[in-house]
Every structure is written in structure tokens, then in C-alpha cells.
Image (cartoon, grey):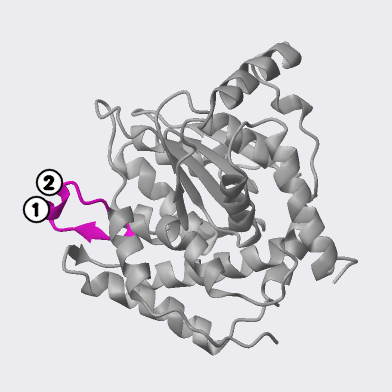
Amino acid sequence: MGSMNLKSAGKTCEEMIRRTLEFFVGEEDLIRKIVCASLSNCHILFEDYPGLGKTLLVKVFARVTGCEWKRIQFTPDLMPSDIIGTMVWRQRSSDFEFMKGPIFTNVLLADEINRATPKTQSALLEAMEERQVTVEGTVHRLERPFFVMATQNPIEMEGTYPLPEAQLDRFALRLSTGYVKSLERECDILRRRIDWAKDDPTEDVKPVVNRKELLELQELVEDIYVDDNIVRYIGEIVRKTREHQAVVVGSSPRGGLSLLKLSRALAMTYGRDFVTPDDVKFFAADALSHRIILNPEQEIRGLSPRRVIEEVVAGVKVPKEFHPR
């Protein structure tokens, strides 16, 4: 499979992280999670307050991957055909021709996704799960890789439409960029703006890989060994989310699959060919918290889904024996 091996793959992943952090001031763990999602061909939902760099981060990382990317600005008047495409009558051929929409790309930036109506949001469901769209009975396959990186603001409720559970479940991760943690980091943002001499520096981002190399990395992830004790560990965490007293609806099996894929990708970023329990813990809250529904009484008391997942993970016995291949 080309010239890519586990050692060179780990170095490439580290370079993707480093290149992203050249343009985005944030935590390395956050960028590593994004890299792992791309290696797993998984979708990400960024949810945080306005002005924290969600859109900038997505644009920078899309360029780092070297893949074709497109952006859709979601608004209440956006129609499904504006995303998928539409049939257009061609007078010369006396026939209809399918004009592809922006969803036909490798990396799709869905900006402020919760501003679109549920009808328009549902246009993404088939594409996100099956990597295809159906128009008038004809199936159109999406080119690999394909993953969605969506953003939404949690505090602006007017003119927004909450994502339904079916849509949320298709996102492997729900991440938060968060505020920078120190004054020096805050000043670093300002200094970089002075150095760039422009508001949007993404045109200067040079890709670390290209589409073919990213596909090779995704295939390498499938070679990462997972011991059966680790498989049972993931399965037990997922099942315990359904048994927690504060939970009405627990994680779907898709949550366990996401946790498995992301854990394998994390191992590869460190140049390892096997998964450890710490790899699973690293993603548990981000991969499962948006897949559970809490009892309303518990929400009123201030209990958060993320806290529930942390309690679940803490209550599951960590396997002491997991054998590297």
C-alpha cells in the first residue's frame, strides 16, 4: 500500500497537528482528536460560543488534509437541493442533467448547521451514513474520503432548529474549542493577527498530505490490532450508558463503533499498532455524551451528559491484560 507504514504514518499525523497549530491557537489534544476523526472518516460537530475560532479551525484543517473542500452556510431559507444538487433541463440534449451540489466534495464545512430547517438538515443524513445521495431514484456515490465538519452555537436559540437525535448520532465526535487557558495564549492570537496582516490566513496553509495519502492513512487504521479484552471494554462502556439511573436513552451501537475506530486511529498517531484502554478513555466523553438523553429531573439538577459518561467510564473495570499483536 504505497510507501506509507506505521512509523511514517505517525510522523505524518504529528505534522498534521503541528501545521494546524501554526494557524490555530488551541490545545494539542483537540487537534489530535480532529486528526483521528479524519483518519477514521468520521464526522465532527463543533459546538461552542461565537468567536472562538470554530470556522477558522475547520478551514485550516481542511486545507491541511490536501483534499477538496466546500463550505455551506446554513440559513433558514436553505433548501435540500442547495446541498445535494438538482435536475436541470438541457435544451441541446432534450434531457435532464443532474447538477451536483456542494455535498460532492471530500471535506464539507457545514457552518451553523442548526440554523437550517429540519427538512434541510435531513438532506445530510444519507450522505453522512452511506456516503451517497439519492435524487429521483438514482443513487450518486460520494468520492472517498468524505466527512462533515459542522459548527453550531449553543446559546443563540432564536432562529435555530435543534439537531434531531438521528442527526447527532451520525457525528462521531462533539467537540468544543473552548477559551484559551492563559494570558500568553490570548496575546498569541493577537500577535499572529499582526503577523498575518489579514483576517483570514487559510490561503497560506500548505497541505501535509493529499487525498491519496489520506486514503492510505485511513486504510492503515484498519490494521491496528484490538485485543478482545479491549473490545469487551468498549462494549461494556456503551451498555452501561443505557443502565445509568439518570439516562432515559443510552448510546447506540454506532457510538461503540465510533469509539472503536477513533481509538485505533489514536494508536496510529502515536506510532503504535495496538489499542490500549487509555485510547478508549481519551474519546469516551466526546464520542458518547451527545448520544444519550438524560432524565429531565437530572438535567434540572445540573447533571450533564458528559458527567454521566465520565461516571460510566469510572465504574467500568479497566482490563489489565490486553495483548499487543
| Depth check, front residue: 151 or 94 | 151
Q: Kindly check if marks 2 and 1 are in contact, taking CB atoms under 8 A apart as contact.
A: yes
Quick one: label 1, few (<14), some, or many (20+) residues within 10 Å? few
Residue 305's place in the image compared with 239, above or below, is above
Residue 27 placement, left or right of 46: right
Counting every numbered tag in the picture gives: 2
Q: Amino acid at mark 2?
A: Ile
Q: SS for tag 2?
A: helix
Is residue 100 visible to the viewer in this orientation of the structure? no
* Residue depicted at 37% across the width and 44% down the height: 121
Q: Secondary structure at mark 1?
A: helix
Out of 6 and 164, give the one closest to the viewer. Answer: 6
Quadrant placement of the N terminus: bottom right
Answer whether residue 190 is visible to the viewer in this image: yes
* Magenta segment boundaries in residue numbering: 291-304
Name the residue carrying label 1: 297
**Residue 291 falls left or right of residue 108:** left
- Tell me where residue 98 sits by quadrant: top right
- Residue 43: x and y, percent? 52, 53
Q: Which residue is mark 2?
A: 300
Where residue 16 appears, as percent x and y from the top left, is 74, 47
Residue 222 vertical placement versus 135 (above, below)? below
Q: Position of residue 154 (x, y in %)?
A: 33, 35
The residue under the point 69% across, 19% down is: 192
Determine the image quadrant of residue 203. top right
Residue at the location (68% across, 70% down)?
221
158 is higher (above) or lower (below) than 278: above
